[in-house]
Amino acid sequence: MIRPLAISMGDSAGVGPEITAKAWKARELHSLAPFFAVGCPDAVTRVWDGPIARITNPDEAADVFDRALPVLAVGDTCQVTPGSPDEASAKAALQSLELAVGLSNAGAAGGVVTGPVSKVQLYKIGFTHPGQTEFVAERCGISPENAVMMLAGPTLRVVPITVHEPLARVPELLTIELVLAKARVTARGLLRNFGIERPRLAFAGLNPHAGESGEIGREEIDVLQPAIAQLREEGIDAIGPFAADAMFHPRARAGYDAALCPTHDQALIPIKTLHFDEGVNITLGLPIVRTSPDHGTAFGIAGKDEANPGAMIAAIKMAASAVQRRAEAAA
C-alpha cells in the first residue's frame, strides 16, 4: 500500500485550497488514494465549510482521510484573503512546497501534487527558479535538463523542449543535445510512470510547415533530424519532425504516445484546448512522483466556489497510479 500523497496547496489566495477540498469531497466518486494537504488550514476554512483534521505527521492522514480532509499546517496562521495575493500567501506557498517535496523525498509521503502558485508573487519573496518544476528538480538533486515537464490528458501527452523562454531565444537554445536529453527522459518516464513498454515519440518542427525542406528555416534539418536519427539508433521509436499545425487532430494523436514540441505554446495550446479541466503536469526524470493541475491560481474566482477541481482530481489520480506502477516495478 502506498503512503498518502502530499498536496502543497499553492498560493493560499488562489483556488488551490478550494480545489484540494473539493477533490477530497469527491474522493469516493473518483476512488482517490489517500492524500493530505500541506499549507494553511485557515485558507481552507475560508473557502469551504467541510470537515478538516489537522495532523502533525503524514502517518495520521490515512486514519482520518475517510471522515475529514487531513491538513498538515506550515508556518504561522496566515490571514489570507481569497483573490488578494500578498507576501504572506506567497511565503505559505513556498513553505508548503518545501515541506511536501521534503516529505516525498524522505519517503514519508507517496508522492507530491503541487497546487498552482503565482510566480510573480514568489519572485517578490526571493524565489529564483523559473517555476515549481525546476525547484522540485533541484530539491531532488536533478539537473534541469534531466527533469522534463510533460502535460498529460486523456488523449494527449506533450513535452515542450524549451519551456519558459522568449520565442526569440528558442533557435539558439534548441540544440541536438537538448533534444536528445528531453527525449531520453521522456521515453524512460513513459515506461516508468505509465507502463508504456515502447514509447512512440513524435516531434513537431519549429518553423511553419516544418521548415519546407529548409526554405523557411533550417532548425528541422540542422537540429531535429539529426537528433531523431540518433534516438532511433538508440532504439527509441522517434518520428518527425512534422508540421505542428497537423499533429493534434484525432488521427495524428493515435500515432504517438507523446509529442515533443520546440516551444512552450506549441505544446500547451493543444493540451489546454483539449483537456483544460483535466490536464496534468507531471515531471519526468525525478526520483519521486510529482504532478500538478495544469492551470493557474485563478485569483479572479478564488473564494467564489466556482473553481473546477477536475484537474486536481486528475493530478491526484495520475500521481497515485505512477507511485503504484513504480512500486510494482521495484517489487
Image (tube, rainbow, N blue to C red):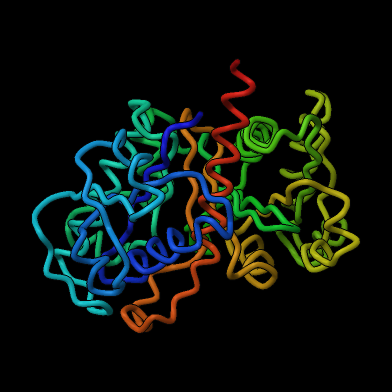
Left or right placement of residue 29 versus residue 122 in this view: right
Q: Residue furthest top?
A: 331
| Residue at the right extreme of this rendering | 251
Q: Position of residue 34 (x, y in %)?
A: 44, 44
Q: Quadrant of the C terminus?
A: top right
Seen at 58% across and 69% down, the residue is: 277
Residue at 55% x, 66% y: name it. Answer: 310
Quarter-wise, where is residue 311 in the image?
bottom right
Q: How many marks?
A: 0
Using the image, determine if residue 284 lies above or below residue 78. above
Instruction: Give how far across and how far down residue 276 sits, in percent.
Output: 60, 70
Q: Residue furthest left?
A: 76
Q: Residue 158: x and y, percent?
A: 67, 53
The residue sitting at 34% across, 29% down in the picture is 108
The residue lying at 33 percent from left, 26 percent from top is 106
As rendered, which of 71 and 74 lies closer to the eye?
71
Provide residue 269's location: percent of width, then percent of height.
64, 69
Q: Is residue 34 above or below residue 117?
A: above
| Residue 218 higher or lower than 175, as above or below | below
